[in-house]
Amino acid sequence: MGADASAVAATAVAAEVADAIAGSAAVALPPASAYRPAGTHLLADLHEVAPALLRDAGAIDALLRRAALAAGARILHGHFHTFGAGGGVTGVLLLAESHISIHTWPENGFAALDIFMCGAARPRLALAAIEAALQAGRVTLRSVARG
């Protein structure tokens, strides 16, 4: 294809893209004031946690269950796994409102926590319960409105 043919093809593609964009602009969107996210997704990194608190799958399971109930969530199922003697824990609670998951590294005093809840559940109450129990020296939090 010569340079002139390439330019014509590029112009045709650009025209198709412009038409597609113009067509999508005709879609009526609700006003921004009507926007309600489906839920809140909290991502928390908990640092400087006592290693013993990060090794006990049973205790972490119980903690996440208390946190879910404090947030007003309904627990459907939980699964927790310990990575050998003295190892970290990976666990998840499946909630009617979504989930809470945790991954721990006792050797680093670190836990990665993921809380996603929709409906009337209040994920920040769950986070507060977990933070209080694990007594992290430092917490980094990201909150994302989903939906």
Image (cartoon, rainbow, N blue to C red):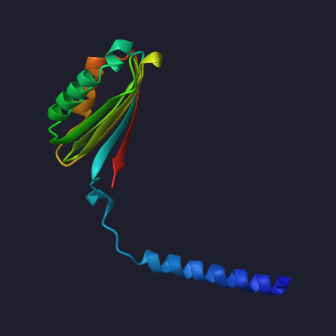
Q: Tell me what residue is drawn at x 17 percent, y 28 percent.
A: 66
Residue 10, quarter of the rendered image: bottom right
Where residue 120 sits in the image (x, y, percent)? 16, 45
Where residue 76 sits in the image (x, y, percent)? 17, 44
Q: Residue furthest right?
A: 2
Q: Tell me what residue is drawn at x 15 percent, y 34 percent.
A: 69
Where residue 79 sits in the image (x, y, percent)? 27, 36
Which quarter of the image is occupied by the C terminus? bottom left
Where residue 8 sits in the image (x, y, percent)? 74, 86
Q: Tell me what residue is drawn at x 34 percent, y 13 percent.
A: 52
Residue nearest the observer in this picture, 122 or 19 = 122
Residue 123 drawn above or below residue 135: below
Which quarter of the image is occupied by the N terminus? bottom right
Total numbered badges shown on the rendered structure: 0
Residue 146 drawn above or below residue 59: below
Residue 97 drawn above or below residue 125: below
Whether residue 99 is visible here, answered yes or no, is yes
Residue 65, quarter of the rendered image: top left
Residue nearest the observer in this picture, 64 or 7 = 64
Residue 22 drawn above or below residue 57: below
Q: Residue furthest front?
A: 84
Residue nearest the observer in this picture, 123 or 111 = 111
In the image, taking residue 69 as reference, residue 40 lies left or right, namely right
Whether residue 50 is visible here, answered yes or no, is no
